[in-house]
Amino acid sequence: MKQPRWLQSAYFAFLRANNKLVLEVAVGLLFIVLGVYFIRHEGVEMTHVAESLRRANSIWVATGLLMMLLFVIVQGLMYQFSFRAIHEKIRLSTAVSLFLKRNVVSVFLPAGMLTNMLFFSKEVEKREGVSRTQIYFASSIFTICSIASTIIVGIPALILLFLKDSLSGKIVFGLVASVLLLAVLGYAVYNIVKEGFLYHFLEKRLPSIFQTIRQLKDQAFNRYDFYAVILLSCVIEMIGITHLYISIKAMGGAATWEMAVVGYGIVLMLLMSAPFLRGIGVIEVALTYALTLFGFTTIAAISIAFLFRFFEFWTVLILGLVALVGQKDNAI
């Protein structure tokens, strides 16, 4: 049955007047659906993580948890220095909260590392008095430096693994694809900075994006604070390597820093190329394979991989969910 014209007009008028509310409800429902899928899909992994924790050395597990807290604090410092780079200031508590909440969002969004910086800006705007545009600029610096540290730490680790002549064909293909993607992104940024063809294409075809790029180019920032963000991001990668080392020790393995660096290098590259759910499943398989190259049995390697993901993924995700639940008037 066809709806009356007046009802259709009222419907579209409501959408125009409440487009922001409709979008928030749609995003909220999407996250609920994805959350249900995530829990059902990852129930088996949660069981394996619990089993690994029961078998692990409690002292090493406690050390890993302390490193996880340091990981969260350094992420907050990265946000602080990202804002300082554009001559703005936010409190460390606000920065840590922003990281934890955006980390949750990044799990469910395709290309979460890039898209999560669009979320939770309003809270920073209210608490710290920073404009939405400045928040976007600082978030861009945070993301760029995160990618830079991935390249700085990840590529040498993969070269080390390649020299061991131990890469399988599928992993080589995935890693080459990741490197090519990074190269394309790097060239795109270079072309825009030098006002090449891509810069002029965006100017003509996508004026809204072009306007944002122009503002980014014109934004004055402190390069020393920018370098500090890169340094802090490299510290994050060092904590990740340490987490893998601790995971091996906790499961009774003979850990070396070489295997921790190589294993974490694979994790970094897969995180860059994984479009959805932060590479869950894929990372565990690839890390297990890398550990078997160093003489671990498949069972031992699987246990280590799950314990590592407990430190690097599950604990941070839980903290983020707690931060989200505690947020006032939080639709998600």
Image: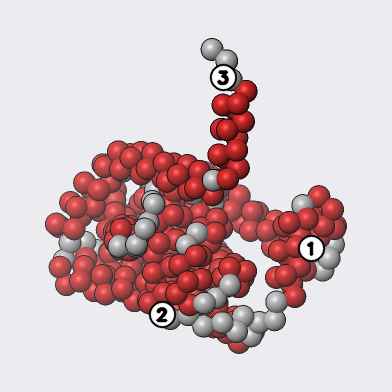
Sequence order check: which comes first, mark 3 or mark 2?
A: 3
Q: Are marks 1 and 2 in contact (CB under 8 Å)?
A: no
Residue 132 figure quarter: bottom right
- For residue 92, the mark is 2
Instruction: Between label 3 and label 2, give the one nearer the viewer.
Output: 3
Q: Please state if 199 lies on the left or on the right of 163 as rendered.
A: right
Q: Which residue type carries mark 3?
A: Gln
Q: Which residue is mark 3?
A: 3
What secondary structure is marked by label 1?
helix
Quadrant in the picture for residue 320: bottom left
Three-letter code, disc 2: Leu
Residue at (25, 70) in percent of width and height? 65
Q: CA distance from mark 1 to mark 2?
A: 35 Å
User: How many other residues sit within 10 Å of disc 3, few (<14), some (14-19) or many (≥20)?
Assistant: few
- State the scheme by which the image is colored: secondary structure
Say above or below: 301 vs 65: above
- Which x, y percent locates residue 232? 48, 78
Q: CA distance from mark 3 to mark 2?
A: 54 Å
Please provide percent x and percent y for residue 137. Answer: 62, 70
